[in-house]
Amino acid sequence: MLNHKTYGTGPNLVILHGLFGMLDNWSTLARRWAENYTVTLVDLRNHGRSFHSDEMNYALMAEDIAALLEEKSIDECYLMGHSMGGKVAMQTALTYPDLVKKLIVVDITPRQYRPGHNDVFAALEAFDPADISDRKEAARLMNEYMPNPGVQLFLLKNLARNPEGGYKWRMNLPAIKANYEKLTGAVGNFGDGYVGPALFIRGGNSGYVQDDDVELINILFPQARVETVDGAGHWVHAERPEALFEIATNFIGE
């Protein structure tokens, strides 16, 4: 079963992180929603403290979510996902629509994307975690390939101390890299799409959700609407958390 963490009581809200992320990325917002909801943060396969697998695609990851909900006796939930997690959320809603009361997708669409993480893979492969003494050394070694300190910090959250010395990656980096083309691929359509309420939240400074994407979104999610958070890039929840919280909370409460 997927590793997860639960906060609060009330109707179920399940949140899925993005590529190279982990459930902790959403913990601050989760605690706020936990005042009115049972919030479950999830580590997706090959990420965080969840299991490692050589196989990784959106159909399997949707199965993982369905299995987790069954294990936790959750009949339906508000399902939210960011980036890769947004695609997992979309796939779950399309494949298991009865499990999803409302769908919230943050800065991603169902379509295929061009590969664009070469610098991230280079930074992650710039050193052997077992050989470093601390995170500062890891950041220094990353810097040639990924000079952005915010992205460095995000990636280095994946480092965990190795009992045998040095560090190790929590995520299954070889499997993520081997399946990367599938992760940039399109969400599969099953049946007539997801006819429940759906909200797509995009960052105003992000190029992930274009105006031209709205037609495809509405084909698969005919009740969907798109809202823009001005001043936010791809990491909407980190850059404009208050705005995202308000938009998502209002949508859930409608």
Image (spheres, rainbow, N blue to C red):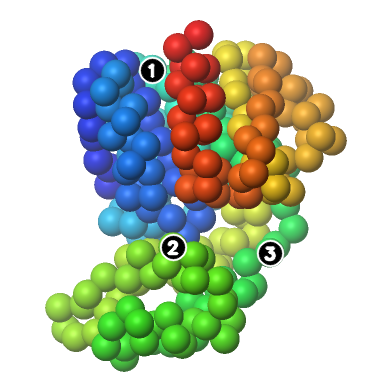
**Image height check: is 161 above or below 50?**
below
Mark 2 or mark 3, whichever is nearer to me: 2
Q: Toward the viewer: 210 or 12?
A: 210
Closer to the N terminus: mark 3 or mark 1? 1
Instruction: Specify whether residue 117 is in view.
Output: yes
User: Which residue has dot 1 on it?
Assistant: 76
Q: Left or right? Give the position of 122 relative to 20.
A: right
**Which is more toward the observer, 252 or 176?**
252
Distance from Cα at disc 2 to Cα at disc 3: 17 Å
Q: Residue at x 65, y 54 (%)?
A: 184
Indicate the quadrant containing the N terminus: top left, top right, bottom left or bottom right.
top left
Structural distance between the alpha carbons of marks 1 and 2: 31 Å
Disc 3 crowd rating (10 Å Cα; few below 14, some 14-19, many 20+) is few
Q: Quadrant of residue 223?
A: top right
Q: Secondary structure at mark 2?
A: helix
- As drawn, 113 above or below 120: above
Residue at (23% x, 32% y) in the render? 7
Q: Position of residue 202 (x, y in %)?
A: 65, 37
Mark 3 = which residue? 116
Q: Which amino acid lies under the numbered mark 3 shown in the image of this protein?
A: Gly
The location of residue 228, given as percent across then percent down, is: 67, 32
Q: Amino acid at mark 1?
A: Glu
- Residue at coordinates 25% horizontally, 40% vertically from top-left? 5
Q: Mark 3 against mark 1, which lies toward the viewer?
A: 3
Per the image, label 1 sits on a secondary structure element best described as: loop
Task: Kindly give the residue lying farthest to the top in the view shown.
Answer: 254
Residue bearing mark 2: 154
Residue 12 percent coordinates (x, y): 33, 21
